[in-house]
Amino acid sequence: MQVSRRGLIAGGLTLATAGGIVPVRRARAAMGTATIAYNVGLPSWDPTTGPSAVNPTIQAIYQSVFDQFIGQNPDLSFTPGLLEKWGWNAAGTGIWMDVRKGVVWHDGSPLTPDDIVWSLTRAGDPKAGNPIQFVWGNLSNFKVDGQRVTADAKQFDPVLFKWMAFLTGFVLPRAYYEKVGAAGFEAKPIGSGPYMVDAFERNAFLRLKANPQYWGGKPAIETVVFKFVTDASARVAEIESGSSDVTLEIPYEEYDRLRKKKGLKGITTPVSDIGMIFITNVAPMLDANVRHAMVMAVDKKLLVDKLLRGYGVPIDTLEAPQYEAFDPNIKTPHDPKKAAELLKASGFSKDKPVRFTIQTTRGFKPKDYEMIQAIVGMWRRVGIEADIEVYEIAKHFELRAAHKLAPAAFYNWGDAIGDPTTSTGFAMFSPSPHSAWKTPDVDAMIGPLWGERDEAKRIAGWKAVDRYIADNALVLPLLQYVQPIIHKDSLNVVPHVSGALQPQRFSPA
């Protein structure tokens, strides 16, 4: 599967890297090829283990190659995937799932209910490395009867089937994986999804070929190339030069400029991603006055209007307006005067500022670094001096999992199922590997909600958690993102509210 960079260039493609464009002669792309200038690379081919499995930005790649238990439409509604039907038993003590017939893996072997059982069992195994093992570990005692799979549940989980369309909810081929092992699968991955891996060079590109036996129908585009272009200006150059057919997550001023150019079209879609600043429970964040001052000093509307050209929705909790537990009554007002007073009460001022580091990505999302620069400037006016440290998104995952983030860390949180457990819950519950603030008071509020069967009570409980978090300034929510996509007018692109740019939804115009 490995091919050289030289070989790719010889094939007529232009390579892009974080440093920019490698200028080579490029033949016009064939009608059956779509090239995507993508904003992140792919660290791992296993969509169910390690930090990559919970990275929302690479789910589009995983969804191109692998199928999920349950599918999801572009508007986030759920649809049959490898499971055609599913549900809980009346007592809420077990689940049943009907597996789709006639599905084959990329090597031509049949997908069976045993693959479903193996994938779920492996996901729930603490030794297998699934970052959300505690979700899948709820299931046990699997039984297969024809195409129906049943399992017992340790407790009722109102979000279990939603997870089957979300992070790590992928089905892998048992026989092939056990034959080649983890290293062999990394070298040559296969799934049952709409595309098959044709060539891959880490940190450079991925080439996919349409799966002619796909149960959902062969994709309209025969060949898809993901170029890993982490620099936003390089992605702009890719689409403007014609070297790529689609790109995303570019500066909004460039989006506004490019969408007016002949031969190009633009799409902006409010997505389920939010921009936030994690706060870790270390000094100086243990001082509530410092946390509240951080929040009050930030003018979120100004950030959206000036930096993002209006492409964004300011938010005050970890729930975007489309999420089930969104409460418009929870507000964290912009009040720099009050922020300065709080800092003064703790012995800080512009002449004697409180100091800490804030970590951020640069070019991962439109204006991410510039936004943090602006926030640091707002903080400086009230008595907060923050040093900016730039890191790649993979480093963020590594540090967060080890609970070693800086006192403040910018992050883009994706919740493609819109449930409060996967926004507020996993961001703020101490046992979660995704949390930064870890304290017993928050855990005591969240804990009982995981298995709450009364849906109205469950959502009300999550709203109470969000209010408590806002009242105590335990995180700094910033905005709901609007995703900019630029593409050639010879291509139809269907955006997905999850933010996943899925090539299986492309078609020739």
Image (cartoon, rainbow, N blue to C red):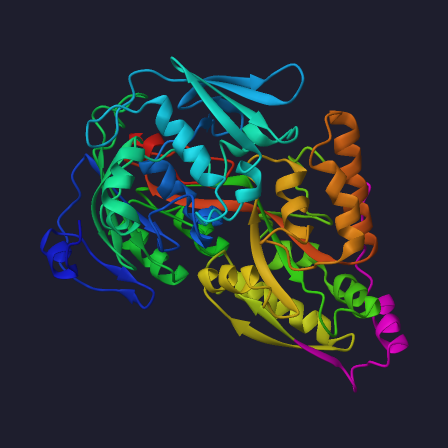
Q: Along the line of sight, which residue is nearer the eye, 182 or 465?
A: 182
Q: Image point 33% across, 15% down: which residue? A: 101
Task: Return the x and y of residue 393 as percentages of the image width and height.
Answer: 47, 60
Q: Along the line of sight, which residue is nearer the eye, 256 or 500?
A: 500
Q: Image point 49% across, 62% down: which residue? A: 398
Which of the 4 image quadrants contains residue 485? top left
Task: Return the x and y of residue 131 as percentages of the image width and height.
Answer: 51, 49
Residue 305: in magenta span: no
Farthest-out residue, front: 141
Q: Which residues are magenta?
A: 328-356
Task: Return the x and y of residue 46 as percentages of the image width and height.
Answer: 36, 46
Task: Return the x and y of residue 252 as percentages of the image width and height.
Answer: 49, 53
Q: Quadrant of the C terminus?
A: top left
Farthest-out residue, bottom: 351
Q: How many marks?
A: 0
Q: Image point 31% across, 34% down: which residue? A: 174
Which of the 4 image quadrants contains residue 172? top left
Whether residue 500 sits left or right of residue 449 in the image: it is left
Residue 348: in magenta span: yes
